[in-house]
Image (cartoon, coloured by chain):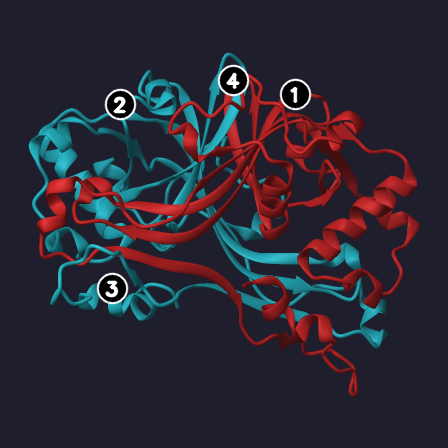
Chain colours: A red, B cyan
Amino acid sequence: MDNATNTAHFNPSDRTTIKRLPKRGSYDRDTIHAILDEGLICHIGFVVEGQPFVIPTAYGRVDDCLYLHGSPASRMLKSLQTGIDICVTVTLLDGLVLARSAFHHSMNYRSVVIFGRAQLVTEFGQKEAALRAFTNHVIRDRWDELRPVKPQEINGTTVLALPLQEASAKIRTGPPKDDEVDYAQPIWAGVVPLRTVATEAIADDRVLPGVAMPDSVQCLSQQRFR
Amino acid sequence: MDNATNTAHFNPSDRTTIKRLPKRGSYDRDTIHAILDEGLICHIGFVVEGQPFVIPTAYGRVDDCLYLHGSPASRMLKSLQTGIDICVTVTLLDGLVLARSAFHHSMNYRSVVIFGRAQLVTEFGQKEAALRAFTNHVIRDRWDELRPVKPQEINGTTVLALPLQEASAKIRTGPPKDDEVDYAQPIWAGVVPLRTVATEAIADDRVLPGVAMPDSVQCLSQQRFR
């Protein structure tokens, strides 16, 4: 991983090489990191007795490591920590691509696919750093606003690390691509951009009097969701 | 499937029974349909030579059938149509749940997980109906605004049908659940709701003069993304 950290690109493996529409593919480290940092949930694919499962979950990133976490009772985490092959995908939907024909309708998106095997994190400091990454991934600087984490919470959370070694991005941008003859059709075509926005935060009923909403929450929509 | 259509619930199978936090689980048909209809992309999990893949893609629903489609050259569709076990997951992220401790941070979400095997659709009329469902899933009534689909487009698209037989939903709503002692902490806690919004549509450069944006596009944000 140290070696990989020093290069701008991940090396395409047989599994990560984009075969369909290769011009949409990217192995650029900054591109992949940016997609992972903008996303909030990943979909984890794993296999138990031949049956694939795809489960959505939160994650955090530190350098070239994606962290997953959950309850020690989680069946998924119990499976993952045996070192089975997994696939983790993060997808950001950027727009609806409306062409002149149904055939050329599409979507603009940015996605990252990671292959590898997750490793159980046992070292206390690394677990704490991972939990900090999860929390601050959801909302910047949140970790420092909270009551300090307790050792039993760290010990009571399963944390797995998935190295970003076999990772690729796939991106579609821009207008529809219609058949040349169809541009003569009197049909509106273009892109409807989509974005995820945070609406007004809702304090829970038991926030103590005088406790104001922190800046981190107030400016969430500006800082996070463009 | 006809039998299932007449009941309000899907029968939980061993695979779809929600084991972790079962109170979040649902097998209610209307709940599952509503999540599938609100989502725009699914993540398809499948296994090739022991390796799981998780690929985002568009979909359409007609009754108790989820349709997938793509190019006949797609490796994924070639694998799927051999009748392998797959898992299709649709996730809607509804909010960030900010607790008083890092440990109880969470997310509000609605997800559907479907297990089964996809079948190649070969009948021309059913393929056309599926393509109509894809298009109108992206934007209501779009199909009828377009130049008519051509037989060679239908023949040149691979369409797969996944029956909604083993399907379950998992839903989290509401405020954080903190440790009782932590409610005495002077820390703001609550929910930041998230939603996907459509911003102003961008016509492509080759829309003919005088062709107005149709109502379907103009009111997309009202009709689709609450």
How far is the residue under mark 2 from the one under mark 4?
A: 25 Å
- Do marks 3 and 2 share a chain? yes
Q: Which residue is mark 3?
A: B217
The x, y position of residue A156, in whole percent, is 83, 44
Amino acid at the residue labelled 4:
Gly
Give the amino acid at mark 2: Pro
The local secondary structure at tag 3 comes to helix
Q: Nearer the viewer, mark 2 or mark 4?
A: 2
Horizontal side, residue B8 vs residue A194: left or right: left
Q: Earlier in the sequence, mark 4 or mark 1?
A: 4
Residue at figure coordinates x 13%, y 37% from the top left:
B128
Q: Which residue is mark 4?
A: A50
For disc 1, the marked residue is A84
Quadrant (top left, top right, bottom left, bottom right) of the N terminus of chain A: top right
Mark 4 and mark 1: Cα distance apart in space: 12 Å
Question: The C terminus of chain A appears in which quarter of the rendering?
Answer: bottom right
Residue count near mark 3 (Cα–Cα under 10 Å), binned few <14, some 14–19, many ≥20:
many
Chain ID of residue with mark 1:
A
Q: Residue at x 41, y 39 (%)?
A: B167
**In x, y percent, where is residue B77?**
33, 24
Q: Nearer the viewer, residue B127 or B117?
A: B127
Separation (CA) of disc 3 from disc 2: 30 Å
Is B75 placed above or below B224 here? above
Crowd band around label 4 with a 10 angstrom C-alpha radius: few (<14), some (14–19), many (20+): some
Q: Position of residue A108 (x, y in %)?
A: 39, 48
Q: Secondary structure at mark 1?
A: loop
Q: Are marks 2 and 4 on the same chain?
A: no
Foreground: disc 4 or disc 1: 1
The residue under label 2 is B72
Q: Chain of mark 4?
A: A
